[in-house]
Image: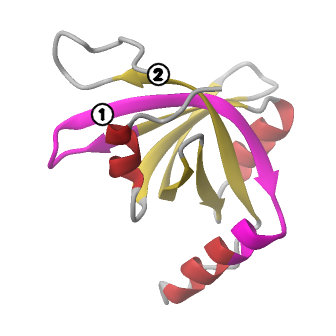
Amino acid sequence: MAKLPEQVTELLKGGHNVWVATIGEDGWPNVAIKGSGALLDDQHIYFADIFSKKTRNNLLYNSKVAVGIFDPDKKVAVQVKGMADMVQQGELFDKVSEAIVGLQMGLPPITYVVRILVDSVWDMTAGPNAGEKIA
């Protein structure tokens, strides 16, 4: 388990688009863009499952996940690796459900919230430190 560095917590405050990579039973990787990536605390990030059939099936098979986070304005990119669990009730689920409804975009109810316990964080920003572990 790793603690998220401050630069990553700053990226995720207020929500963010994230790219989520999973691997399924067939051995093929899957990458999906999630518009609800957010910070839970200094050891967890999360996103809502709204349209995530392939991601959901892959996580049921293998809970390892990699999440790409990019801020084009700050020109910062990181990858967070960790273990995911699917939350279907409780405070986090209610909070995320209410936030999605509050968007007033006509989205269907969320199925679950994917909570990711951070194992490691990697620099993906272009430059000499790209690919280095930062946490």
Location of residue 22 by image quarter: top right
In three-dimensional space, the C-alpha distance between marks 1 and 2, rounded to whole angstroms, equals 14 Å
Quadrant for the N terminus, please.
top right
Residue at image x 75%, y 47%?
Answer: 56
Dot 1 crowding, Cα within 10 Å, few <14, some 14–19, many 20+? some
Point out residue 55 in the picture as x, y percentages from the top left corner: 68, 44
Point out residue 24 in the picture as x, y percentages from the top left corner: 75, 29
Which residue was labeled with disc 2? 135
Q: Horizontally, is 126 left or right of 121 in the view?
A: left
Question: Which is nearer the N-term, disc 1 or disc 2?
Answer: 1
Please give the label number shown on residue 118.
none
Q: In this view, does 70 lie above or below 120?
A: below
Point out residue 23 in the picture as x, y percentages from the top left corner: 69, 27
Point out residue 85 in the picture as x, y percentages from the top left corner: 78, 45
> Is residue 105 visible in the rendered structure shown here?
no
Residue at image x 80%, y 29%?
Answer: 62
Q: Horizontally, is 33 left or right of 112 in the view?
A: left
Extent of the magenta region: 69-94
Question: Residue 24 versus residue 92: which sits nearer the camera?
Answer: 92
Of the residues shown, which amino acid type is indicated by label 1?
Ala
Residue at image x 23%, y 36%?
Answer: 76
Q: Horizontally, is 38 left or right of 87 in the view?
A: left
Of the residues shown, which amino acid type is indicated by label 2?
Ala
Residue at image x 84%, y 39%?
Answer: 60
Q: Does the magenta stretch include residue 93?
A: yes
Question: Residue 44 versus residue 93: which sits nearer the camera?
Answer: 44
Disc 1 on helix, strand or loop?
strand
Location of residue 124 by image quarter: top left
Q: Is residue 18 magenta?
A: no
Q: Is residue 130 above or below residue 56?
A: above
Please give the label number shown on residue 77.
1
